[in-house]
Structures are given as structure tokens and as C-alpha cells.
Amino acid sequence: MNPNFSICVYCGSRPGAQAAYTEAAQQVGDWIGRHGGQLVYGGGRNGLMGVVAQATLAAGGRVVGVIPQALVDKEAANHDCTELHVVQTMHERKRLMAERADAFVALPGGIGTFEELFEVWTWQQLGYHNKPLGLLNVAGYYDGLMDFLRSAVAQGFMSDWQMDMLKASTQAGSLLPDLVQAAGLSARAQLDDI
Ligand code: AMP
């Protein structure tokens, strides 16, 4: 069965220092699965990436993993994925992930996560795609980044319209439906949505 929507999740290949990060990753995967969605992600078992994937599968969702050959061992390729694509380069990985997604969301993570988030953001501002982009600010992890971005606007290096492209929220339960709706799609209704 075709998924109702496809969300690309960027997040840490490590779990981070607080249980709240793992809990949020679990919630995101669970929400995607329960609402008839598909997760697109980097295809590994490590860290928050593995948590999101296993939670999506456990909730009945599809999972598309895309991993470069060179990272199959390092990031523990997840053979439980509904589709696991082993590609040659990081560029192929990012292109395929972006193609397969209707929307993007970043959870806490490190430089790999930052790079992926900023890349799809810059692609959107250049008009290469028009897919909604979200930032899940778990336990204040991205407060410093948001402050910095606002200072970039105040200092004249960014515009409000660029900031507005990034939907930031502390709540997965409101951010994810907003992204699906902004993509022009609908999530399968659940009793606990009401
Ligand atoms: P990190 O947030 O650093 O834990 O990395 C999260 C994911 O981003 C991992 O799957 C990394 O392989 C991936 N990653 C690291 N560098 C890049 C990059 N330049 N482009 C795309 N993904 C990357």
C-alpha cells in the first residue's frame, strides 16, 4: 500500500546526552507509522537514527534507508528497513533522500544533521524544491541555533522570508501534522488526534 506521506528525518547518529532526545525520536517514528506514513532516513541503526527507524517499523510504517557503501559498517546499516538503498556516494544518498521525501524534519544531531538541514533549506530558497522544512527543538537543544539565526537576520545577512521557511517547534505532535499539511497531503486519522 502506498504511504499517505513520506517524511525525511535528519538526526544524530549518536543518542545524545539526554533521554528526551531518544523519547522524541521514538515519538516521531511512532507518529509516522501510526498515521500511515513512510520514513526516509540515512539507513543506520546507530543513535537517534536507529530509534526513529525502529519506532516507525514498530508502528506499522514503511522505512526507506539510504546509506553510502562506505558507511554500511560504520553506521550499522539497518537491514530491517522496508527498502534499504546502498549507494556509492554521500551526494547520491542526499539526492535520493530528498527525492523520496514530501517534507523534511531535523531532530537533535551533530554536524551531519546540521549539514543536511542547511542543504535542503538552501535548496528551498533557491527554488530547487518546495517541500516543507521543520526543526524539532527538543529540550532546548536548538535554542542557541535559533538565537544565532535571528541575529543573522538582525545583522542583515538573512531575511525574514528565509527564516519563515523553517518551521521550528518543540512538539512533534504538532510539527509533523503541520508539515504533512503544508506538503498538501493528509495523515491517516487516529482516535488520539482528536
Ligand atoms: P551526525 O548528526 O553527525 O550524527 O550525522 C547524522 C547523519 O548525517 C549520519 O548518517 C551521517 O553519515 C550523515 N552525514 C554526515 N556528513 C554528512 C554530509 N556531508 N552529508 C550528508 N549526510 C552527512
Image: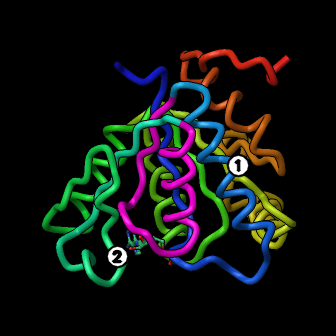
The quadrant where ligand 1 appears is bottom left
Q: Looking at the picture, tell me which residue is in the foreground, 162 or 42.
A: 42
Q: Residue at x 75, y 63 (%)?
A: 149
Say what secondary structure mark 1 lies in. helix
Q: Residue furthest left?
A: 88
Indicate the colouring scheme: rainbow
Mark 2 vs ligand 1: CB below 8 Å? no
Q: Which mark is residue 161?
A: none
Q: Is residue 10 left or right of residue 188?
A: left
Residue 50 to residue 36: above or below: below
Disc 1 crowd, CA 10 A, few/some/many (<14, 14-19, 20+): some
Residue stretch in magenta: 37-59
Q: Residue at x 16, y 61 (%)?
A: 87
Q: Residue at x 86, y 66 (%)?
A: 139
Q: Looking at the picture, tell me which residue is in the foreground, 43 or 94.
A: 43
Residue under circle 1? 27
**Residue type for callout 2:** Ala
